Image (spheres, helix red, strand yellow):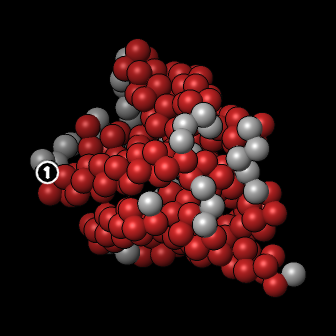
Amino acid sequence: MIDWVLYVLLGAAMGTLGGLFGIGGGLIAIPALGVLFGLEQQLAQGTALVMMVPNIVLALWRYHQRTRVQWRQALPLVLSGFVFAWLGSLLAVGLDARSMRQGFVVFLLMLAAFNGVQMFGTRHTTVRELNQPWPRMASLGAVCGMLGGIFGVGSGVVLTPVLTGLFGASQVVAQGLALALAVPSSAITLLTYAVHQHVDWSIGLPMALGGLLSVSWGVKLAYALPQRLLRTLFCIFLLLCAALLAVKS
C-alpha cells in the first residue's frame, strides 16, 4: 500500500511537470524510473507510457474544447506518425538496454540544444493557421513518430519546437497538432512495449492516476509564467536528466 501511494505521488509530480512543460510527463518519468527505481531503459520507457497515454488523451480533449485542431494538417502527421512510431518501438524493444540509455542521453542533449537555439535564434512571423503541403507534414510525422517510438517520449516532444521554430506556428497551433499526433503514436508504442513485456503495470497504473489528478495544475502554472522562463527551465531540466542518466549508465 505504501508503494502504491508513493507511485501515485510520483505520478502527480511527473504530471505537474509534464503539464508545466507541455510534454505529458514521459520525458521526465523515464529518467526518474531509471535513476530512482533502477528500471532498465526499455522497461522505464514502457512504464512511463502507461502514465503518458491517458494524460495526452485528456490534454487533447481539453485543448479541443478551447481551440480548433487543424485536422487537415494533422491527418498526414497522424497517419505517418502512427506507422513510424510502431516501427520505432519494434526497433527499440530489440536493442541493448545500456545502448538505449546512452542514446536517450544524446537525445536529451540534442533536444536541449534545439530548444536553446530557438530561444536566442531568429524569430519567425507567427501564423495562426498552417498551410503546409501534405508530403512535408507526412515526412515530419514520420521522423517524430520514429523518435517517439524509439525513446517512448511521445512524438509531440519533437514536433512542437519544430513547428514553432521552423514553420512559425503559434504555440497554440503547434501544441494542438502535437497532441493529435501523440495520441495514436504513443498508444501503439505502449502496445508494442507491453507485448514484449517492457511494462511494469504495478508502477505505471498508479502513476497514471497521479498524473491525471495533477496535470491541470502544471498547465495553469505554465500559463502564469513567461514563455522564455519556461523554455529556460525546460532546457535546464533536460540537461539535469541527461546528467543523471549518464552517471547511472
Q: Which residue ends up furthest to the right in the rendered image?
A: 1
Q: Nearer the viewer, residue 174 or 237?
A: 237
Quadrant of the rendering where the C terminus is positioned: bottom left
Q: Residue at x 81, y 76 (%)?
A: 4
Residue plotted at (54% across, 41% down)? 96
The residue at which mark 1 appears reads as 121
Asked whether, in this view, residue 2 is left or right of residue 70, the answer is right
Count of numbered circles on the image: 1
Q: From the viewer's perspective, tell me whether residue 184 is left or right of residue 175.
A: right
Disc 1 residue type? Answer: Gly
Answer few, some or many: residues within 10 Å of disc 1's Cα (few below 14, many 20 plus, some between 14 and 19).
few
**Quadrant location of the N terminus?**
bottom right
Query: Which one is in front, 167 or 191?
Result: 191
**185 left or right, relative to 208:** left
Quarter of the image for residue 238 reads bottom left
Pinpoint residue 93: horizontal percent, then vertical percent.
62, 37
Q: Is residue 188 above or below residue 220?
A: above
Callout 1: SS: loop
Q: Is residue 221 above or below residue 21?
A: below
Observer-nearest of 69 and 119: 119
Residue 222: image location, x then y, percent: 45, 70
- The reply to whether residue 213 is visible in this rendering is no
The percent coordinates of residue 157 (x first, y second) are 45, 48
Q: Is residue 39 above or below residue 124?
A: below
Query: Residue 69 appears in which quarter of the rendering?
Result: top right
Is residue 211 shown left or right of residue 105?
Answer: right
Q: Is residue 83 visible?
A: yes
Q: Position of residue 86 (x, y in %)?
A: 62, 28
**Residue depicted at 46% across the width and 45% down the height:** 99
